[in-house]
């Protein structure tokens, strides 16, 4: 399999001022193209370290991608490094010069000598024309090893990877094994439980299939991957394990695809059943409504929401009984149930859901520790609440609450009896 290295350049990446999203995106992009990404390196704005790092990767990998250090300021030295590394001479590229000058004229900015210098490129490179910015990319090749040097601005880098780099890869690396990956998205089940459900997969890993469990606050993604001489053979290798995962974890899988959102799956089910939804939130502060409204076309099923953080607003907007709050407290099954029913009736929705809890990091008690959350549901005449105790982290508590509400809705709409994390439904006695 083709070997690839990724090199990110910039002090800001090492000290944490900028999160290195480029490396993650490039790694995924190259993997989908059939590369084995075996090394990701971050290097500061230091000439010697950059020179040695690029030289070493170029000697060992079939393909190396470098991002960063191509701007017009004094700390942008990547172009000088690769110019020296390949014993090139900087020459002005007239097309790049005209492009940069036009950008500055259109924006009515001064065209400075530093900007003009960006049109100077090594004479041994093939220019990768950057229509999204002022720094051109550069392509080098020697002895069947290749190097792409790209700007660090994410949308410029992605444009060049798709429009300039990929066509070269497709041509130069044709005939190599193709790489295929399948992603199963699950929710409401711990990683360890999911692994136990699916069982021993050694026979598949021994046959060249990669299997990974990727947990996050929204659930666990199962990644299956393999390589083969062509797409058809790769699909055939993955077929049996894909069927096994589907069979063993069917109730927990909400769909396939790395970027599939649970909110979209729930929205599609609501549309299919010609149902709509109203949302009432306290501890999640609008995050649940935001997840639902992030999906294009949600106006077909999303009526609206009430973010009722205060008790007064719960009473006024959701018809919560003041005595219920006095007796049971705002974080209780009784309030969650009343909020869910209240928003359904106030909005005329088929489905009403609610969240109320102690997100933290303060505010907890012995009886109701930080992370305690009640979620209410009013759906198809089924009125119940779920209780969870998450973590001491405010953001994680909000994110996990959203996931549990959406996954509970998915299962209810599909008629799946089990609930996320095997939670038990609570009803008013």
Image (cartoon, rainbow, N blue to C red):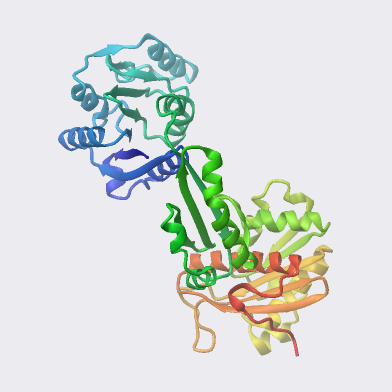
Above-or-below relation of 285 to 325:
above
Q: Quadrant of the N terminus?
A: top left
Indicate left or right for 416 with 369 as reference: right
Asked where in the image residue 355 lies, by quadrant, the reply is bottom right
The residue lying toward the viewer, choosing from 312 and 412, is 412
Residue at image x 48%, y 26%?
Answer: 163
- Please give the count of numbered marks on the rendered protein: 0
Q: Quadrant of the C terminus?
A: bottom right
* Residue 168 screen position, x and y as percent: 42, 24
Residue at image x 62%, y 74%?
Answer: 356
Above-or-below relation of 408 to 105:
below
Indicate left or right for 105 with 55 as reference: right
The residue lying toward the viewer, choosing from 412 and 99, is 412
* Residue 306 screen position, x and y as percent: 70, 64
Indicate left or right for 374 with 68 as reference: right
Above-or-below relation of 37 to 270:
above
* Residue 236 appears anywhere in the view: yes
* Residue 249 appears anywhere in the view: no
* Residue 211 screen position, x and y as percent: 46, 57
């Amino acid at each position: 399999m083709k070997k690839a290295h990724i090199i990110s350049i910039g002090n800001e990446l090492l000290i944490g001022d900028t999160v290195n999203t480029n490396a993650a995106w490039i790694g995924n992009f190259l993997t989908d193209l059939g590369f084995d990404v075996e090394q990701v390196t971050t290097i500061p704005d230091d000439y010697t370290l950059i020179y040695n790092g690029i030289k070493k990767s170029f000697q060992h990998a079939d393909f190396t991608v470098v991002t960063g250090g191509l701007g017009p300021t004094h700390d942008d030295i990547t172009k000088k490094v690769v110019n020296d590394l390949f014993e090139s001479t900087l020459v002005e590229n007239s097309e790049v010069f005209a492009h940069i000058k036009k950008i500055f004229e259109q924006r009515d900015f001064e065209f400075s000598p530093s900007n003009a210098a960006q049109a100077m490129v090594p004479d041994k490179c093939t220019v990768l024309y950057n229509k999204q910015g002022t720094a051109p990319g550069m392509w080098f090749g020697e002895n069947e090893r290749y190097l792409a040097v790209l700007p660090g601005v994410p949308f410029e880098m992605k444009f060049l990877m798709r429009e300039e780099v990929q066509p070269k890869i497709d041509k130069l690396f044709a005939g190599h094994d193709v790489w295929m990956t399948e992603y199963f998205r699950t929710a409401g089940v711990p990683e360890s439980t999911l692994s136990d459900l699916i069982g021993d997969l050694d026979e598949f890993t021994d046959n060249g299939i990669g299997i990974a469990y990727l947990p996050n606050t929204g659930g666990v993604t199962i990644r299956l991957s393999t390589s083969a001489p062509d797409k058809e053979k790769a699909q055939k290798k993955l077929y049996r394990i894909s069927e096994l995962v589907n069979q063993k974890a069917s109730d927990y899988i909400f769909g396939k695809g790395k970027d599939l959102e649970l909110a979209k799956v729930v929205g599609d089910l609501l549309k299919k059943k010609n149902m709509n939804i109203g949302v009432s939130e306290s501890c999640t502060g609008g995050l649940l409504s935001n997840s639902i409204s992030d999906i294009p076309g949600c106006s077909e099923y999303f009526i609206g929401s009430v973010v009722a953080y205060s008790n007064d607003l719960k009473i006024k907007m959701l018809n919560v009984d003041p005595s219920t709050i006095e007796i049971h407290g705002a974080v209780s099954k009784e309030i969650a149930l009343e909020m869910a029913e209240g928003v359904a009736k106030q909005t005329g929705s088929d489905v009403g859901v609610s969240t109320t809890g102690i997100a933290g990091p303060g505010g907890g008690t012995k009886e109701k520790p930080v992370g305690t959350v009640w979620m209410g549901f009013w759906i198809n005449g089924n009125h119940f609440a779920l209780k969870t105790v998450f973590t001491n982290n405010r953001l994680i508590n909000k994110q996990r609450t959203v996931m549990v509400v959406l996954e509970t809705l998915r299962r209810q709409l599909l008629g799946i009896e089990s609930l996320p994390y095997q939670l038990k439904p609570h009803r008013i006695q």
